[in-house]
Amino acid sequence: MTATATTVTPNPKLSSAYSYSHYFQNHSSPKWTLEMNACKWHHCRRGQMIVTKASSSGSGNKEKAGKRSTNTKKSNTNTNPDALTQQQQQQQQQQQQQPVSISLDDVNPVGLGRKSRQIFDEVWRKFSGLGQISRTTRADDKESLDALLIREGPMCEFAIPGAQNTTVLVVGATSRIGRIVIRKLMLRGYSVKALVRKADQEVVDMLPRSVEIVIGDVGDPCTLKAAVENCNKIIYCATARSTITGDLFRVDYQGVYNVTKAFQDFNNKLAQLRAGKSSKSKLLLAKFKSADSLNGWEVRQGTYFQDVVAFKYDAGMDAKFELSETGDAVFSGYVFTRGGYVELSKKLSLPLGCTLDRYEGLLLSVGGNGRSYVLILEAGPSADRSQSKLYFARFSTKVGFCRVRVPFSSFRPVKPDDPPMDPFLVHTMTIRFEPRRQRPVEGPSGAKQDLRSFKLILEYIKALPTGQETDFVLVSCTGLGVEPSRREQVLKAKRDGEDSLRRSGLGYTIIRPGPLKEEPGGQRALIFDQGNRITQGISCADVADICVKALHDSTARNKSFDVCYEYVSEQGKELYELVAHLPDKANNYLTPALSVLEKNT
């Protein structure tokens, strides 16, 4: 009896619960038996696979045939073997005569590679059951599946060095991006913790079994201690369920702040247990909380040039640094002299064994009336001030309190011929006010402002730690796809959350994707840009892949960027050159894409 062929076309949309055993249970008869040695897979054009079923004739049939009558044996022996040979030859001739049509898609190397990968993945998923490590796995297969994962570890094709020693907390694990992020992390060998608001059956079935589920709320700091415990990195995918201002503030701003603070507190506690200091902790340079903390700060005045008629414009300048009645350290005054400035300076006194070359910038917590200032660092031999070099960077404040982050890479030499600043040699810090580059700020009353007067309230000055990798990945948004009437509120909450992450001292990566689309990833090239200029959407799977790759990419640390699908600008509107990068697990497309983008943004 000849073998019968059944054609099965792989479909990526099939449920993970589907299996070939289910197929043969519904379509087989008692006469058919399935043997693995008789199954043969053949690749045909356009990704089809042919499964050859085994013939029903076997050893059992031969034994039954031996018990038959002599007449039956004779009738079987009279079968003509030449007829079977002719029939096989006719089938081979018919297969050879079938016309084969080949198109450009069939010979495209990229298309052939993708189809072969899809065929291989589908075969592997059907027979091993490892494609979806989820709670939908049958109860009788759980023990064997866990034993296989423990023995073999992650799939070697996706494994990342050091992933097995890294625990990642995914905030917003049930979101569209979070669910994909979790599965990508597990395939690469990470230990994953998922923060959810409630662990009902629907949420439990949505997440893989190997994920550690932690119940908590980003708006409640008390529930985050257990979530960040023993975590090395965090991916924040949570977003507000509505565009109500209260929800936006709780999730997009206060939630980011609470998670970063809980993560820093855990690192500090861990460092204290080890009798050391956390590498993610900020170094306190000055804290203004009492009259004694003002000692050593010197107020000085000066001018940029000497004018022979300066007396005509010299209306005077004055400044003071004192503790107010409310306990605030206030640096205030006015500068009416043309080309004049006032400044507050102090020689730094660092703890024993600490140098600024281990840090990457300064963080100032200040308040006031919204003026801009110049931060000057003096570097060189502390014993010989004549050999010192001056480096400056400008920063702006706003009405009320704010935190300003000034990276060391933004400092420029006062004299262009001087070498770049070496943080190891910094010994003096100066905050300078000059009226020549002031801009009006929006005030509550709208009254006319005198840009020559200033008021700066100082709370503390800290140094931000340096590092090689990202500690916190935040998924933000560009505002595209948001309802226009609520776009401003959404973007404000997102930007406030981003600012709180930058000021935390953690190594960060902020991803602003275009409108999210529910479609497979890795199919289209991606555009990475800065400046809020993208106009296209992007797949959730591609955003999840960027989050995972950014965890160990040094070029992603302390960068904010927009990402979307590749597109062609309209004629006459080519504002900049687009650089597209095709996602591929065989190479890290993220490194060349981010290496050209600006840091500390």
Image: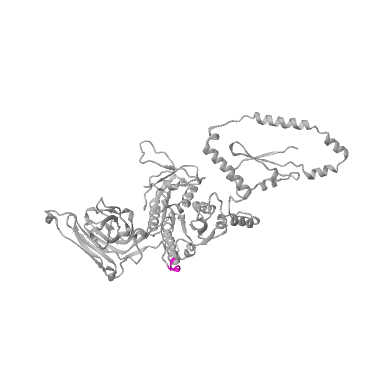
Q: Main secondary structure of the magenta part?
A: helix
* Nearer-the-camera pick, 251 or 299: 299
Q: Residue at x 82, y 44 (%)?
A: 63
* Nearer-the-camera pick, 300 or 390: 390
Q: Is residue 372 visible?
A: no
| In this picture, residue 375 sits left or right of residue 121 | left
Picture quadrant where residue 28 is located: top right
* Nearer-the-camera pick, 193 or 376: 376
Q: Residue at x 68, y 43 (%)?
A: 39
| Residue 572 in picture, x, y percent from top left | 35, 36
Verify whether residue 589 appears in magenta: no
Q: Residue at x 71, y 30 (%)?
A: 89
* Nearer-the-camera pick, 572 or 265: 265
| Residue 507 in picture, x, y percent from top left | 41, 57
Q: Residue at x 41, y 38 (%)?
A: 568
| Residue 583 in picture, x, y percent from top left | 48, 45
Picture quadrant where residue 383 is located: bottom left
Quadrant containing the N terminus in the rendered view: top right
Magenta segment boundaries in residue numbering: 271-275
Picture quadrant where residue 501 is located: bottom left
| Residue 416 in picture, x, y percent from top left | 25, 50
Query: How was this image coloured?
Result: one colour
Verify whether residue 272 appears in magenta: yes
